[in-house]
Amino acid sequence: MITVNQRTYRVPTHPTVVVCVDGCEPDYIAQAVAHGRMPWLKQVLAEGTALLADCVIPSFTNPNNLSIVTGAPPSVHGICGNFLFDAASSTEVMMNDPKWLRAPSVLAALAEAGRTVAVVTAKDKLRRLLGHDMKGICFSAEKADTATWAENGIAQVVDLVGMSVPNVYSAELSEFVFAAGVRLMSRPVGQHGRPDVMYLSTTDYVQHKHAPGTEGADAFYAMMDHYLGQLDAMGCVIALTADHGMNPKTRMDGQPDVIYLQDVLDAWLGAAVARVILPITDPYVVHHGALGSFATVYLPAGLDAAALVERIKPLRGMEAVLTRADAAARFELPADRIGDIVVVAERFTVIGTAASRHDLSALDAPLRSHGGVSEQRVPLILNRRINGLDPQRRWRNFDAFDLALNHAQ
């Protein structure tokens, strides 16, 4: 047994794989299964365990991947976005550095307990966070060709997988993750051999581009089904969940439906009096233009946050506008890292800073994005039937390791 962040887990008796499918709105699975493109998962849905769960808010990549591997919300592990305003230095920074982590991971604890652990991510931005203090294999598809024993616990990854490193803006980047997982799990048991526990995390490039049920989406989920079926055939316990869902964010003319909140606040308060931060921001903004449905606002001392909350609420497209304390309580966020006001947009709306700061010229399809409560519902599926689960419980994506290790072995 191991205990991590006040949750207890059994060490696995079967090889165990937890998969985070980035941007996996449940309807992607429903449509692909209905179209006959996921025969393995169709059988799992009938014979295994199929739940709907909530991800953490903001429904972005970093907070949710870290919630899954720590078994805890951002209020515990500290990662509350992809991007952060560091009040101590008055700078806007990426939350890719492990220094922002406030809690250990289940992965690190399992490795410390003597289990062989492997992590494969699509983008390199997550690698250092997921692999923090973990003894084992940890590499990204994006940087697979530069993996070393010293840094990643493995080398010659491209030769192992049999694929060249894909473009970061491609479905193949996620396929590399699954292909790598299958090859790692195919290795014999022993030192540098088959993992006891593996965490696979994909990219949501396809979900940003393709709606559920379209050929582009169905082809992606058919690919995923193929590799997951192989892992299942090897005897793996598989838990599949997602970091967030995905929705169209457009007006009726197909153009992005954006509230440029910095422009609004500048008009009300004066230029740059308030600072709008978009936690969706990361190095890969081509497919979403740094537009998501969640933002935080930092205010100067003496400005009444509660009064400004009431002024922002009536703006068209707003779902929730909360003070720091209310947002921290409602969304289980670290209060010292979220600004004075938290703003969440409705399902079809995104929040920007100033219109002049968003380059949307690279969008070659109607905008699809995430970040809000409308993208909170995600799948939580296991290829083992678990009896006696409470149907009234609010399941979370960060229950994945609990179900996989404590109930599905």
Image (tube, helix red, strand yellow):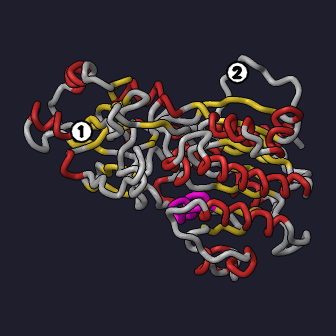
Q: Residues within 10 Å of mark 2 (few under 14, many from 20)?
A: few
Q: Residue at x 29, y 34 (%)?
A: 340
The quadrant in which the C terminus is found is top right
Q: CA distance from mark 2 to mark 1?
A: 37 Å
Q: Is residue 123 magenta?
A: yes
Q: On the image, numbered disc 2 is attached to which residue?
A: 393
Q: Is residue 5 visible?
A: no
How far across and down, in percent of the image, does residue 29 sit? 68, 39
Do the CB atoms of the residues marked 2 and 1 lie less than 8 Å apart? no
In x, y percent, where is residue 67? 59, 43
Which amino acid lies under the numbered mark 1 shown in the image of this protein? Tyr
The kind of secondary structure element at disc 1 is strand
Is residue 34 rendered to the left or right of residue 408?
A: left
Between 79 and 290, the one lying in front of the other is 290
Magenta region, residue range:
121-130
Identified at 85% across, 48% down, the residue is 237
Q: Residue at x 29, y 48 (%)?
A: 87
Q: Is residue 164 above or below residue 387?
A: below
- Report the disc number at residue 260: 1
Foreground of the two, 42 or 62: 42
User: 334 or 23: which is nearer to us?
Assistant: 23
Of badges 2 and 1, nearer the viewer stands 1
Tell me if residue 153 comes above or below residue 363 in the rendering: below
Q: Amino acid at mark 2?
A: Arg
Find numbered disc 2 in the image and state the secondary structure of the residue it sits on. Answer: loop
Residue 109 appears in the rendering: yes
Horizontal side of residue 383 vs 361, given as left or right: right
Residue 195 position in % (x across, y down): 81, 63
- Which percent across, then down, holds residue 369? 44, 42
